[in-house]
Image (cartoon, rainbow, N blue to C red):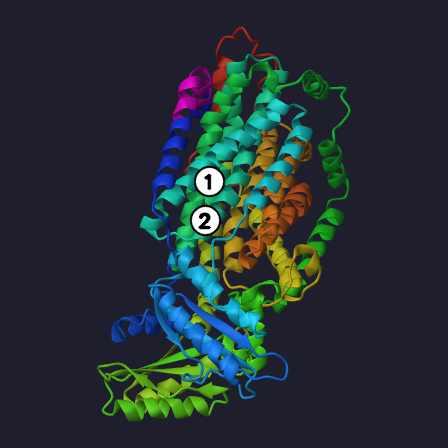
């Protein structure tokens, strides 16, 4: 592989104008596709194989035109102090708003008058209008949203408090500031790392080109492939981080080759042939982890993973082709005078050891203590993960200043917290001899379970199916509400045996519960698949059994610690105000498995970049301890910069107004912090120091069976050594420093 990439690097350097034109053309084509594509709808949320999804599908079949997947809204009214919503003036205002909403948009499917639908609180202080739409929230027009928001303005002027809840006001989260912050911090780190504006700007520009192509392609295909808004945000978040990192390693290697006196084309070839090999395998681990999300069998998650994996693939191709081409345009300006002198001084035998070298020597002196401190420290941070509660965010997780949160709280105060998450019980009476009696039996049984309210059964036209709305006593995300769902389902089994009618529970709350359970059930199979495939891949790279095993165990430690930090901040509220968390609650159901997918791939980046250099040094005759020092000497500075950049990009998304995006940004940033600086920079060298030569042990039969992918560039080194020295003086000790990551 190293030989092929070496030739590719030289070719793209020579033909840089053609390469640049190809990538610019691809960017323009993707941008044109995104600009001309129809507006994407929200990604349909389905959970195949769950009871809630079966009930949802049954509703669409038996209750045609019910718009089961349409957007909903609740316009909540609270009368002024000392008044009631049933007072003549207030009632007149609310009735007028009902008529206004009915005629306000042709996207409205139905509007329920609160005085006819019994949507008035017992004390008469609160009422709400339920609005259903023919399309989902992302397909609502601005005119429809304006009509909804403007409906209550007259009522507010009369003194009533009016708030609007539901998903009808849901819009694509704005994250523009997040990207700007992340890129700005990345730019500062790159300037400090390279000491050259040209060298610092090149990874940023190439990464932005890759993200532009990836996100534009996703936008262009969003409507056709039913991709949600979160898909492009995730792809941007990960694509920007790895794009900068991969280019950073190529540029760093190229500058090292220039410092040794090589000609520019040869330096580009060697940079791509060596650091490029690590980029390929690091990118492959990220792609495996993201694409592996498909095993969960939730279409939305599968699409998010595949889209992000595609963006990472583009980042790898950019690093291997556009980066060396850009290096050709940059000329000698890629390395400033001070940077060149510093690099040359570092390569001299009498040079003062850099920070990476000093740290590696410290770890070699105290390996047991470093390992214990790292493991125990992460273990303590991981403790809150034992209290993990999972769910999907609802309006109760919105900032207190939003109308959605105000509506949620007003409903809770007036009717009880369960009104924010009603359950929908679907009775399939096809096989029942008396459908009405079966539905009544279901209603009575549910009422005996201690819920707040049960609405009488409503049958379809055919009379073979009925719906029963159930209001729990507690909030949608509570453990008590989850128990109610399970109790209804357990009771349904007995009812089916008695009457032949099947009882199914659905609704947003039940869907969330089933989603969480599906996430839990898929976690171990997903871990086995992703970690197993990555273990085999790393065994190819390092030709060792213990090194990949240590990499996988270290990753699990960092992920559990990061999950503990997420629980402490978002569930317990520790330092919540610092991160803009206004309302604590359950952790998003997909977070554990999502963190495993994304963080595993990113964690393996640092493992490959750092340990590959150690492996190369060991293969070429250095002792295990000296190989660790050599790896840190050449890789610690760049890996540190890469980790800081990735953390900055992810942390930028903490400022998002969307709770899910905020949580994802925080979790990925803290996971990179733990994995890069505690696991890879401390625990890994400590474990390698304790293992010594055993770390690189591989059974002979397995060594013969595994293909040699030549990540260390041994074949390339031999080829270059055998060739006559060229004009750049490539044989003057270049072999010894050939692979530097």
CA distance for labels 1 and 2: 9 Å
Task: Name which of mark 1 and mark 2 comes first in the sequence.
Answer: 2
Percent position of residue 333, x then y: 61, 16
Quadrant location of the N terminus in the rendered image: top left
Task: Give the structural element (helix, strand or loop) at label 2.
Answer: helix
| Pointer 1 local density, CA inside 10 Å: few below 14, some 14–19, many at least 20 | many
Residue occupying the point 76% across, 27% down: 353
Quadrant location of the C terminus in the rendered image: top right
Badge number at residue 290: 2
> Which region is colored magenta?
7-22
Q: Quadrant of residue 138?
A: bottom left
Dominant secondary-structure state across the stretch colored magenta:
helix
Q: Could you tell me if the residues under marks 1 and 2 are in contact, i.e. CB atoms within 8 Å?
A: yes
Residue that lies at the very extreme toward the top in this rendered image: 727
Observer-nearest of 75 and 24: 75
Q: Which residue is mark 1?
A: 312
Observer-nearest of 217 and 347: 217
Residue occupying the point 48% across, 39% down: 283
Percent position of residue 722, x then y: 49, 13
Q: Is residue 8 magenta?
A: yes
């Amino acid at each position: 592989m190293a030989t092929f990439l070496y030739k590719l690097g030289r070719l793209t350097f020579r033909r840089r104008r053609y390469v640049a034109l190809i990538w610019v053309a691809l960017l323009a084509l993707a941008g044109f596709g995104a600009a001309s594509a129809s507006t994407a709808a929200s990604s349909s949320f389905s959970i195949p194989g769950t009871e809630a999804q079966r009930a949802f599908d049954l509703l669409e079949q038996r209750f045609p035109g019910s718009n089961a997947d349409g957007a909903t809204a609740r316009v909540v009214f609270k009368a002024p102090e000392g008044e009631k919503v049933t007072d003549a003036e207030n009632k007149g205002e609310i009735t007028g708003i009902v008529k206004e909403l009915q005629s306000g948009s042709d996207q409205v499917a139905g509007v329920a008058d609160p005085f006819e639908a019994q949507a008035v609180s017992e004390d008469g202080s609160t009422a709400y209008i339920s609005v259903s739409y023919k399309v989902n929230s992302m397909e609502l027009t601005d005119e429809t949203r304006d009509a909804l928001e403007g409906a209550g303005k007259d009522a507010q002027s009369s003194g009533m408090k009016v708030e609007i809840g539901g998903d009808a006001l849901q819009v694509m989260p704005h994250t523009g500031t997040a990207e700007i912050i992340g890129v700005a911090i990345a730019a500062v780190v790159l300037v400090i790392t390279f000491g050259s504006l040209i060298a610092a700007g090149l990874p940023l520009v190439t990464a932005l080109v890759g993200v532009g192509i990836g996100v534009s392609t996703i936008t262009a295909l969003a409507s056709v492939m039913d991709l949600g808004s979160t898909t492009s945000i995730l792809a941007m978040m990960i694509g920007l981080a790895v794009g900068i990192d991969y280019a950073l390693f190529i540029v760093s290697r190229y500058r090292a080759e220039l410092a040794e006196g090589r000609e520019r084309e040869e330096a580009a070839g060697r940079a791509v042939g060596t650091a490029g090999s690590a980029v390929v395998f690091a990118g492959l681990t990220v792609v495996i982890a993201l694409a592996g999300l498909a095993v969960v069998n939730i279409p939305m998650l599968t699409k998010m993973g595949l889209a992000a994996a595609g963006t990472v693939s583009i980042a790898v191709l950019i690093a291997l082709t556009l980066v060396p081409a850009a290096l050709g345009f940059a000329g000698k300006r890629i390395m400033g005078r001070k940077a060149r002198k510093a690099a040359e001084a570092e390569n001299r035998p009498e040079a003062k050891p850099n920070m990476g070298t000093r740290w590696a020597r410290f770890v070699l002196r105290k390996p047991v203590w470093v390992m214990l401190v790292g493991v125990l420290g992460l273990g303590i941070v991981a403790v809150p993960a034992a209290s993990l509660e999972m769910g999907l965010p609802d309006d109760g997780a919105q900032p207190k200043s939003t109308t959605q949160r105000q509506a949620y709280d007003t409903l809770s105060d007036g009717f009880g917290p369960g009104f924010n998450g009603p359950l929908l019980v679907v009775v399939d009476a096809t096989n029942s001899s008396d459908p009405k009696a079966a539905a009544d039996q279901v209603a009575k049984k549910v009422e005996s379970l201690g819920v707040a309210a049960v609405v009488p059964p409503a049958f379809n036209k055919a009379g073979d199916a009925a719906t029963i709305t159930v209001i729990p006593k507690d909030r949608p995300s509570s453990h008590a509400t989850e128990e109610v769902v399970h109790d209804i389902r357990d009771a349904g089994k007995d009812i089916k045996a008695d009457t032949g009618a099947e009882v199914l529970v659905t609704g947003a709350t039940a869907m969330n519960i089933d989603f969480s359970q599906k996430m839990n059930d898929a976690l171990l199979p997903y871990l086995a698949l992703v970690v197993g495939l990555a273990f085999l891949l790393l065994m190819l790279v390092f030709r060792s059994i213990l090194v990949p095993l240590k990499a996988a165990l270290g990753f699990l430690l960092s992920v559990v610690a990061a999950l503990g930090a997420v629980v402490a901040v978002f569930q317990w509220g520790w330092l919540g105000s610092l991160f803009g968390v206004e309302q604590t609650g359950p952790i998003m159901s997909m977070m554990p498995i999502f963190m495993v997918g994304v963080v595993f791939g990113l964690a393996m980046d640092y493992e490959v970049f750092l340990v590959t250099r150690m492996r190369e040094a060991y293969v070429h005759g250095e002792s295990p301890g000296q190989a660790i020092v050599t790896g840190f000497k050449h890789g610690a500075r760049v890996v540190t910069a890469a980790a800081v950049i990735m953390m900055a990009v992810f942390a930028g998304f903490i400022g998002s107004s969307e709770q899910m995006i905020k949580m994802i940004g925080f979790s990925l940033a803290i996971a990179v912090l733990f994995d890069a600086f505690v696991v890879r920079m401390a625990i890994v060298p400590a474990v390698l120091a304790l293992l010594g030569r055993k770390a690189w042990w591989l059974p002979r039969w397995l060594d013969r069976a595994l293909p040699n992918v030549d990540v260390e560039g041994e074949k390339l080194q031999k080829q270059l050594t055998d060739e006559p020295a060229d004009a750049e003086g490539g044989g003057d000790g270049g072999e010894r420093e050939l692979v530097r990551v």
